[in-house]
Image (tube, rainbow, N blue to C red):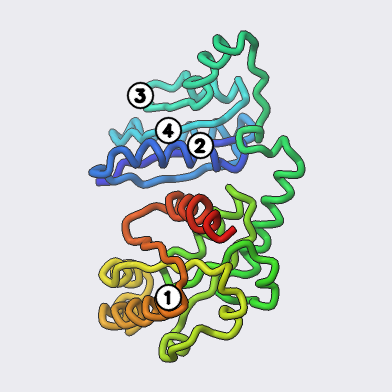
Amino acid sequence: MSTRVFILSDHTGITAGSIARALLAQFPDQDFALEEHPFLDNMEKVSAIADQIESLVQSGSPPLVFSSIVDRDSRTLLGEKSGWHLFDIFQAFTPGLKKFLGTAASPVAGHLHGIGNTALYSERIQALDYAMLHDDGSITRNYAQADVILIGVSRSGKTPTCMYLALHNGLQAANYPLVDEDLETTRLPAILRDHLDKLVALTIEPEQLHRIRQQRRQGSRYSSLEQCQWEVHQAETLFRKYRIPVIDTTAISIEEIAMRITTEIMQDTK
């Protein structure tokens, strides 16, 4: 049975979510069901989510709770609840920082991930807009503006990786799905050949791809193991032919995929 994990934030929750995932990844044998609750920016919202968590505690299924909420009254309300496994990011780190720096903290909602820096915030929003507009090959004419273009078969992790790269790194990331028509040839689509220096390929074990697709279209040709094996084989053949850097997404997180793209692949192409 999965342990429910609540991630609470008075803004986007990106920081709290990243910390929670990093910590929970240390327990690979445990099954977690994460629920993100961003923009809890008033006492009414905080109280409502507190009641929801309290009901789970009373039913004998207490969740883990990670919080990056800044407001003192909201944090007090959460801290007063009994029976919770609450991990307050500010409480964990702020006292030590205050002692080391010799000054009091002045928390402001949103500053955790740089929203206080208007230019940085604007860059990330523009990157997110670009990623959403150029998802799944819907628009290809603006690929010259892309920092990176992810390619791969359907359900190999392209979309969430693009969103992560936009939100965390401010990169304009597009993605292009390789479909049957592309895979039946021995050449990449012309639009991709024009931007080979920006391509990063994502691949995945056919068995894992089969399991993922079964959740979406069970019993279909699209989700059959034979189709998954054929698509992955054809795609990897194209990747080798054009010497495109490849990341196997089978057993790594979106965060790890993004880190490899930014710290290994993109650095090597500069």
Helix, strand or loop under label 1: helix
Q: Earlier in the sequence, mark 3 or mark 1?
A: 3
Mark 2 is on which residue type? Ala
Secondary structure of residue under mark 4: strand
Left-right relation of 142 to 250: right
Residue linked to disc 1: 239
Distance from disc 1 to disc 2, alpha carbons, whole Å, reads 36 Å
Above-or-below relation of 122 to 129: above
Task: Name the residue beneath numbered marker 3.
Answer: 83
Whichever of labels 1 and 2 marks the residue nearer the N terminus, that label is 2
Asked whether the beta carbons under mark 3 and mark 4 sit within 8 Å of each other, the answer is no
Give the answer, above or below, for where 222 lies relative to 5: below
Asked if residue 54 can be seen in this view, the reply is: yes
Residue type, label 1: Phe
On the picture, is 247 further left or further right than 125? left
Q: Which residue is mark 4?
A: 65
Quadrant of the image occupied by residue 83: top left
Upstream in the sequence, badge 3 or badge 2? 2
Q: Secondary structure at mark 3?
A: loop
Q: From mark 4 to mark 2, how far is it between C-alphas? A: 10 Å
* Lower position in the chain sequence, tag 1 or tag 4: 4
Camera-side mark, 4 or 2: 2
Q: Are the residues tagged 3 and 2 within 8 Å (C-beta)? A: no
Depth check: 204 or 41 in front?
204
Few, some or many C-alpha atoms within 10 Å of disc 1 (few <14, some 14-19, many ≥20)? Answer: many
On screen, residue 172 versus residue 99, left or right, reads right
What residue does disc 2 label? 16
Query: Which amino acid type is shown beneath numbered disc 4?
Result: Val
Which of the numbered marks, if any, corresponds to residue 9? none
Real-space Cα separation, disc 3 to disc 2, in angstroms: 21 Å
Left or right, 10 with respect to 26, comes to: right
* Residue 104 found in image quarter: top right
